[in-house]
Amino acid sequence: MTQIIVLPHVELCPEGAVIEASVGQSICDVLLDNDIDIEHACEKSCACTTCHVVIREGFNSLDAAEEIEEDLLDKAWGLEPTSRLSCQALVTGTPLVIEIPKYTINMAKEGKR
């Protein structure tokens, strides 16, 4: 099991969290399995940016993002060099510290198809 520290998020995880994850699980699934209701408008199919997270520690342990993820991340609010789509980033054996950005862009929900 790998430890993931989730930094406090005002709505989704006000106190922050320390959770255990299995190697190979997506960060999005780990969060959802631990009652951290991160948006995932495309149902984890790498077609939106609503599950965007910033990896504060452990970024280099993750496999590199594929081109489609990189292209989508360019549209994410609050993009940083260590940003990932949590539906695409798979947990390795290295502990992670993640931050869920304050805002997300959900074009379908906001009527901007």
Image (cartoon, helix red, strand yellow):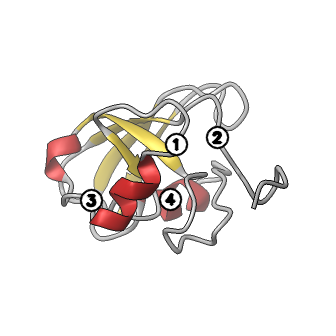
- Residue denoted by label 3: 65
- Give the percent coordinates (x, y) of residue 6: 47, 36
Is tag 3's residue or tag 2's residue first in the polypeptide sequence? 3
Is tag 4's residue or tag 2's residue first in the polypeptide sequence? 4
Classify mark 2: helix, strand or loop: loop
The answer to whether marks 1 and 2 mark residues whose Cβ atoms lie closer than 8 Å is yes
Q: CA distance from mark 4 to mark 2?
A: 14 Å
- Give the percent coordinates (x, y) of residue 38: 63, 50
- Residue denoted by label 1: 76
Please state which amino acid type lies under the numbered disc 4.
Answer: Cys
- Give the percent coordinates (x, y) of residue 36: 63, 48
Q: CA distance from mark 3 to mark 2?
A: 19 Å
Quadrant of the snapshot with the C terminus? bottom right
- Residue denoted by label 2: 104
Q: Which residue is more in the foreground, 108 or 40?
A: 108
Is tag 4's residue or tag 3's residue first in the polypeptide sequence? 4
- Residue denoted by label 4: 28
Q: CA distance from mark 4 to mark 3?
A: 15 Å
The image quarter containing residue 24 is: bottom left
The answer to whether marks 4 and 2 mark residues whose Cβ atoms lie closer than 8 Å is no
The image quarter containing residue 86 is: bottom left
Classify mark 4: helix, strand or loop: helix
Q: Which residue is more in the foreground, 70 or 53?
A: 70
Disc 1 crowd rating (10 Å Cα; few below 14, some 14-19, many 20+) is many
